[in-house]
Image (tube, rainbow, N blue to C red):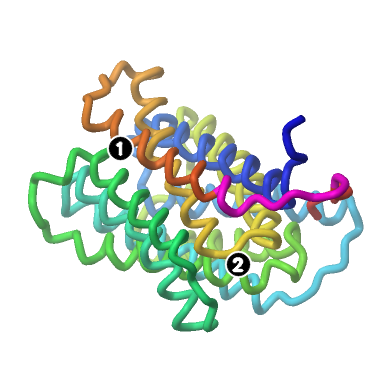
Amino acid sequence: MPPAPGPRAIPTVLLVGVTAIWGWTFVVVKDAIGHYPIFSFLGVRFALAALVLWLIVAALRLRIRRPGIGLSIGLVLAMSYLFQTMGLRGTSVANTGLITGLFVVFTPILDRLIFRVATGPVTWLAAAAAFAGTALLTGGAPAGLHQGDLLVLLGSVGFAFHITLLSRFASAGPLVLAAWQMTAAGVFLTVGGVATGAVVIPVPRSVWPALVITGVFASAIAFWVQTYAQQRLPASRTALILTTEPAFTVFFAFLLVGERFRLIQVVGATLILGALFFSELRERRPVGAAAPVEVPI
């Protein structure tokens, strides 16, 4: 009889589901940002996510606490998206994917430097394999360095910092903490869009489906799940799981818009998934009885 799932199995599966959603939304957003400024799109997306989460908080009558932590983490998230998007304008897509994937390397480094969290050799090995897979998935980034590479690099460090902070403070309550994050990101990016002269209102009718999909599913639900999962997973492992996102991105690009796989991308995706499964098998511990299922609020 196979061993019962370890305590990390459920959050691992949930996080993989989140990366699948994020991978899918790259295809969804591609057309939307051609009709609506990126700054404004991100601001409205996160504002909508905040509204959805606060409605759930009110319906469940949860205690609203520790806003400072959630708002601070949300600002880190907003800056990460902003740097990544600005950098994308000045570099190639391949370089952007490769440099963003460096968060899997930056996360255990930041976790160790900031919070003195020990990092075992298995984690480093899995992180190196996932990074190599990301490089192959983006075709090795053959175009060389571009002007926006530094901004994308800052975004990658920001995503690693976001993961590290969530692993430290997720115990504050996943739903409320996610709501504060979305609030900070929505306000910051919307105000930033207005300050830079980006058109926020009216929102083109053709953009609303993408906003609803990304705001509700890829932001509100996804970051709620991520915050819940990081109550139970270390930062370095979360970063490793999130590297499955580019694999899903390539898959949905092929499935929905007909982009073809190349052999090097297949090898990269396989290497990323292999690193995840290797880490999962090494870290799984047998348990005498199944742990009770907790409601992620």
Question: In the shown orientation, is residue 172 left or right of residue 25?
Answer: right
**Which kind of residue does numbered mark 1 sit on?**
Gly
Query: Residue 98: image x %, image y %?
Result: 26, 50
The residue lying toward the viewer, choosing from 121 and 270, is: 121
Q: Residue furthest front?
A: 1
Mark 1 closeness class: few <14, some 14–19, many ≥20 residues within 10 Å: many
Instruction: Report if residue 282 lies within the magenta region.
Output: yes
The Cα atoms of the two marked residues, 1 and 2, are separated by 28 Å
Q: Which residue is mark 1?
A: 268
Instruction: Report if residue 141 lies within the magenta region.
Output: no
Q: Are marks 1 and 2 in contact (CB under 8 Å)?
A: no
Q: Residue furthest right?
A: 61
Numbered circle sitting on residue 188: none
Q: Quadrant of the C terminus?
A: bottom right
Numbered circle sitting on residue 166: 2
Question: In the shown orientation, is residue 227 left or right of residue 46?
Answer: right
Name the residue: 28% across, 64% down: 153
The residue lying toward the viewer, choosing from 68 and 196, is: 68
- Magenta segment range? 280-290
- Where residue 140 sits, quadrant-wise, is top left
Considering only order in the chain, which callout, 2 or 1, is on the residue closer to the N terminus?
A: 2
Q: Quadrant of the N terminus?
A: top right
Name the residue: 19% across, 60% down: 149
